[in-house]
Image (cartoon, rainbow, N blue to C red):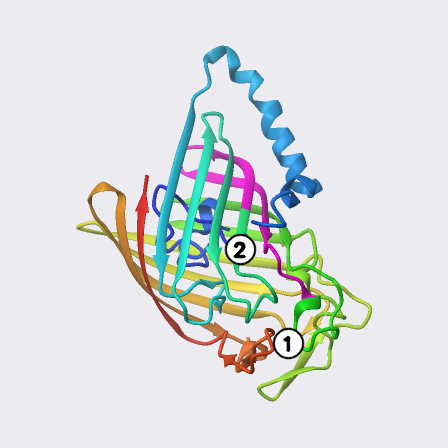
Amino acid sequence: MDRPCPKRGMVIVSGSCLSPDFCMDFTRQRNMEENMNAPYQNPAIGAALALFALALPAAAEDAPEFTVASNVGVVSDYVSRGLQLNWGNPALQGGVDVMHRSGWYVAAWGSQVTDNFYAGGALELDLYAGHRGSIGDALTYDAGLAAYFYPGANYRKAAPVGAYPDKRYDTTEAVFGITWRWLNLKYSHCLTDYYGYDDRTVPLSVWNSGVFGGVDAGKGTRGSGYLEANANFNLGDAYTLGLHAGHQSVANSSKLSYSDYKLGMTKAFADGWTASLAVTATQGAELYRNFLSVAGNGKTANVDGVHWLLGVNKAF
């Protein structure tokens, strides 16, 4: 769901995952079998890729140079925007970023997820396209599209089978971020329903932890947004302190919007290795507490709340 940065690895605390989630500013900013063709069928991503291709000829005479960066790592759990997406289990993650010197880029990132949360799914595959550049001497920006895919996952596979419609979790967002020195601000706007949420998949009758909530009758969640602030401080000796605060607003819903926070420390080592420790927390996400598995196995988990995370990453 979120965007990692291969050069710094998924353990940089600059987004909402120790993965978008310390890596929101590369992919990050939140994905392969039956959905491998999905990115090309998505109009938003297709338009961004076409724009990327059109931008290349302008610099062809200057022998354009490309930068390729990649990473692979493992985390003790995958937490994105404050929510536990692998239910306390370790997750293997990795990504690749291809960037043209003009600032245009395309990227991909993936992570293990649990079918307890995504019915019939085990993988998150994120695809990104956009442009990075500078505004004067002090500001940089990143504008583009992010699409999150969950191969094999579908609400119709959720228990009890037959109770939910044929709808996928796949989501596309328009993303804009701006960075000044150590501070980054970013907003992600849903161009589709928010992870498939509508009045059929998450009806207003949803009850959990003493709270009723869901999506308004006859409505979807297109137009939902995630606003976040990230700060990274170089403490010396290759240590980086990361702070994050975000708010997820879910359109046309009751009790689904919430806030999340993160505090983390990253240590860089030789040859592209990094290690990290972080703690995340949520506020107002009671509907995700004591969450009943959609796999029908009777398991429950506090998808919200406080989570401690460990991660090791190798950048290439």
What residue is drawn where x is 42% and y is 55%? 230
Q: Which residue is mark 1?
A: 255
Q: Nearer the viewer, residue 177 or 285?
A: 285
Q: Which residue is mark 2?
A: 124
* Residue 181, picture quadrant: top left
Q: Position of residue 177 (x, y in %)?
A: 51, 46
Label 1 or label 2, whichever lies nearer to me, is: 2
Helix, strand or loop status at disc 1: loop
Amino acid type, mark 1: Lys
Magenta segment range?
127-155
Q: Position of residue 186 (x, y in %)?
A: 52, 51
Query: In this rendering, is residue 87 above or below 187?
Result: below
Q: Position of residue 305 (x, y in %)?
A: 46, 76
Determine whether, in the image, residue 219 is placed left or right of residue 42. right
Q: For the stretch drawn in magenta, what is the main secondary structure?
A: strand
Q: Nearer the viewer, residue 253 or 129?
A: 129
Distance from the alpha carbon under mark 1 to that under mark 2:
25 Å
